[in-house]
Image (cartoon, rainbow, N blue to C red):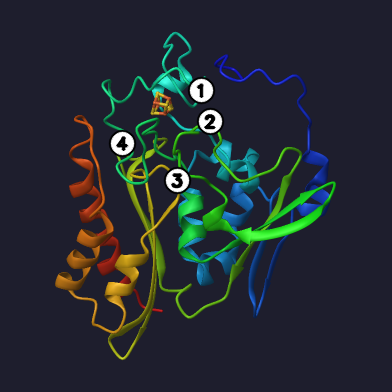
């Protein structure tokens, strides 16, 4: 709105709903985070930090303390792309802002743009961090509207751009996010979020990896991998997870998983470096998670 990109006729302040949807509940089944929990409250919660470090880390690395104190988790997952052509209205061609106008980034400055899940209509990358942690942990999201409540996989909340990049989520008009459910699992403690960016703070990721592992007797029983900064939506690397199952997590395995995770990458010039950076980021995150003492 401040950049003159969005012109809503009505803006509704939902902050009062914090009384209903601003709680963190933790039990044997897992974690429930209300949509109006502030980023700082979840990031600083001692049990979240101990049992779900990937969530705390993704929130701390996502924003400055001022923003973490103000921003809600529900709002965080719905943030818009940082594509400069989307945010600068002096550029005409942007299918996400104005459907049917084209995509200035295809032949323009696309260093920060996505290499996974893109289409000929939009190559914008999803900018968030917390969402990758939710994707990796198999989270579900509760949605509420005047017609009732539905619960979907968080992985299904964001849409790939296809030929309708202006439709970014499966939310219906009038539907609100109520909260996130993160199931408990033997992989949540051995989890971490690695964010590679141009500078060390107040910066969006150019390649990020959210990794959670269940390792038993030196062998990977389950691996969970989310990728960010490189994809059109919070990205789950299912094939890389399958590759790691049932084998020790050494450097060869980490590199093989990273290769398969980026096998489908498509670049556009300035972002040619991203698949390699993404592979290195993921391999480093996997090896660091394997070394964690839990
Ligand atoms: Fe618009 Fe997407 Fe192209 Fe950026 S990448 S100019 S957001 S259509």
Going from N to C along the chain, the mark reached first, 4 or 3, is: 4
Q: Are marks 4 and 3 in contact (CB under 8 Å)?
A: no
Neighbourhood count class around disc 4 (C-alpha, 10 Å): few under 14, some 14–19, many 20 upward: few
Q: What is the x, y in percent for residue 215?
A: 35, 82
Q: Are marks 2 and 4 in contact (CB under 8 Å)?
A: no
Mark 1 lies on a secondary structure that is loop
**Residue to which mark 4 is pinned:** 199
The mark closer to the camera, 3 or 2, is: 2
Going from N to C along the chain, the mark reached first, 3 or 2, is: 2
Question: Is 18 in front, or is 223?
Answer: 223
- Quarter of the C terminus within the rendering: bottom left
**Residue to which mark 2 is pinned:** 166
The mark closer to the camera, 3 or 1, is: 1
For image coordinates 28% across by 28% down, the residue present is 110
The mark closer to the camera, 4 or 1, is: 1
Mark 4 and mark 3: span between their CA atoms? 23 Å
Question: Is 30 in front, or is 49?
Answer: 30
**Residue to which mark 3 is pinned:** 233
């Amino acid at each position: 709105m401040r950049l003159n990109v969005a012109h809503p006729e009505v803006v509704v302040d939902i902050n009062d709903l914090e009384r209903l949807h601003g709680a963190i509940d933790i039990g044997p089944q897992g974690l429930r985070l209300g949509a109006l929990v502030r980023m700082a409250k979840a990031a600083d919660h001692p049990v979240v930090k101990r049992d779900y470090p990937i969530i705390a880390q993704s929130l701390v690395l996502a924003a400055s303390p001022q923003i973490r104190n103000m921003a809600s988790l529900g709002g965080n997952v719905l943030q818009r792309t940082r594509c400069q052509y989307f945010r600068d209205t002096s550029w005409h061609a942007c299918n996400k802002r104005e459907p049917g106008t084209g995509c200035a980034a295809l032949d323009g400055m696309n260093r920060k743009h996505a290499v996974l899940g893109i289409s000929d209509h939009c190559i914008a990358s999803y900018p968030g961090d917390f969402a990758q942690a939710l994707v990796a942990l198999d989270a579900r999201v509760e949605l509420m509207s005047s017609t009732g409540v539905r619960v979907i996989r968080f992985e299904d909340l964001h849409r790939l751009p296809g030929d309708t990049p202006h439709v970014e989520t499966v939310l219906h008009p009038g539907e609100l996010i109520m909260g996130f459910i993160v199931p408990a699992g033997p992989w949540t403690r051995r989890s971490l979020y690695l964010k590679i960016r141009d500078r060390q703070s107040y910066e969006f990721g150019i390649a990020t990896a959210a990794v959670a592992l269940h390792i038993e007797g030196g062998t990977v029983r389950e691996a969970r991998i989310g990728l960010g900064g490189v994809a059109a939506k919070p990205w789950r690397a299912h094939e890389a997870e399958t590759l790691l199952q049932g084998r020790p997590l050494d450097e060869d395995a980490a590199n093989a998983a990273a290769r398969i995770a980026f096998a489908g990458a498509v670049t556009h010039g300035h972002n040619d470096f991203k698949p390699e950076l993404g592979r290195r980021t993921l391999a480093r995150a996997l090896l660091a998670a394997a070394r964690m003492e839990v």
